[in-house]
Amino acid sequence: MPSNYANHILVASPSHVVRQRVLESLRSPARRFEQATGGAEALVHLESGFWQVLFLDRRLPDLDAEELSQTVRRRYPEIEVVLLDPEVERPLGPDLDPDLGPDGDPEINPTVSTVTAVCEAQSPLATWSGADPDLSRSGADNAARAAELAPARDLMLQSPLPGMIGDSRIMQPVCRLVRLLAPRDTTVLITGPTGCGKEVVARAIHQLSPRAGRAFVVVNCAAIPETLLEAELFGYARGAFTGAMQAYGGRIQAAQGGTLFLDEIGEMPLNLQPKLLRFLEQRELQRLGSAEVVRVDARVVSATNAHLLSLVREGKFREDLYYRLCVFPIDIPPLRERTEDIAPLAAHFLRTYSLRPPAPQLSAAALQLLRAQPWGGNVRELQNVIERALILVEERAVIYPEHLMLADSGFRSSR
């Protein structure tokens, strides 16, 4: 998260006094504060910037606070959410007038000390740099607190992504990069060998982004014939060609508001690359047979197992398109470099493909054999090996090496 956004705090409450007490308790020149009177307004603020902490009044007038907090945690995992219960706090004193709620009844106001305590207990990120020493901690204490919390924050950033199995050390930098870039609309290029999980990472970027509730549209550039790819991507008008009986919006337009995933982008035909480049630059397209310009708001994530710069040098891929796609590169290591992930991946596939509970288990010798494989097909190859083993093991409860039908060994009879 950029340092200039590190201390951004949003307070959402229908009560002016509640908002002010939270702000006063954490007031510091190093922090930026914004206020919202309801849940919908809070979401607007969240979508327009980067935030560290959201203080959420349980008595929102328009949305359920619990449901909103779950939505925020799902869409913005970097944000700490603190739920406030002003009605159970003690009043500031008889000399202060209570704030009147929407029904005219006086609201009970939280004290400065209580809000600070809630902040420290429920939202440790809120006590990072910039706190007022008279209201919470001294500068030295805050620095020490930040140092204590940094490893926990790093651990959260490096934790497995949605849909990802395993937590090997070599994948932790990948997880960290994905969690840092997901809240932005940055164009991403994912590279790595076939079957290593590039689409899993692409889906995680989408699921961790503000676009998570919208479409995730996949286009495999290698699977669609070159003669059809342009029409599939950009759409066409009625009568644009023989058989075009009705207009078709295309897959790019289908990703409106969401994410467009261009898999095997290295297979994009050279004649279509200028049209894709224009969409990336202008976020607009023209359907085949139509002069109408259509604007599309879609984040673009692409993936390839090819070395695109080599294709550029060979004249098979446009250099300007490469740099448009590679705003933020992420490289996925092959499975042979992630041997820590083989056991949890195998266990996941056993549970997924087993037809009977409980699923058979791998023997120690079978697991050792799996860890020693080169895995040219990566995770997809491991998935196939486990699915075959479940067939060969028949009714047995344990999978042994003889049940593993590996690529370099051919069929091993289980008899």
Image (cartoon, grey):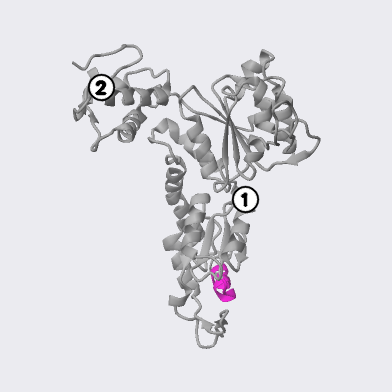
Gap in angstroms between the C-alphas marked 1 and 2 = 58 Å
* Farthest bottom residue in view: 94
Query: At 44% across and 62% down in the image, what residue appears?
Result: 120
Of tags 1 and 2, the one toward the viewer is 2
Question: Residue 21, position in %: x, y?
Answer: 55, 72
| Residue hosting label 2 | 392
Query: At 25% across and 20% down in the image, what residue appears?
Result: 403
Main secondary structure found in the magenta portion: helix
Of the residues shown, which amino acid type is indicated by label 1?
Asn
Label 1 CA crowd tier, 10 Å (few <14, some 14–19, many 20+): few
Residue 337, located in which quarter of the rendered image? top left
Give the camera-side residue of 347 and 413: 413
Question: Residue 100, position in %: x, y?
Answer: 57, 82
- What's drawn in magenta, residue-wise? 14-24
Of the residues shown, which amino acid type is indicated by label 2?
Leu
Question: Residue 237, position in %: x, y?
Answer: 74, 34
Task: First in sequence, mark 1 or 2: give its number.
Answer: 1
Q: Is residue 404 left or right of residue 332?
A: left
Residue 347, located in which quarter of the rendered image? top left
The number of callouts visible is 2
Query: At 62% across and 16% down in the image, what residue appears?
Result: 310
Q: Is residue 144 left or right of residue 46?
A: left
Instruction: Indicate the quadrant containing the C terminus: top left, top right, bottom left or bottom right.
Output: top left
Q: Is residue 22 magenta?
A: yes
The answer to whether residue 32 is seen in the rendering is yes
The answer to whether residue 127 is seen in the rendering is no
Question: Residue 164, position in %: x, y?
Answer: 42, 37
| Residue hosting label 1 | 4
Give the camera-side residue of 132 and 391: 391
Residue 218, located in which quarter of the rendered image? top right
Q: Secondary structure at mark 2?
A: helix
Give the camera-side residue of 287 and 376: 287
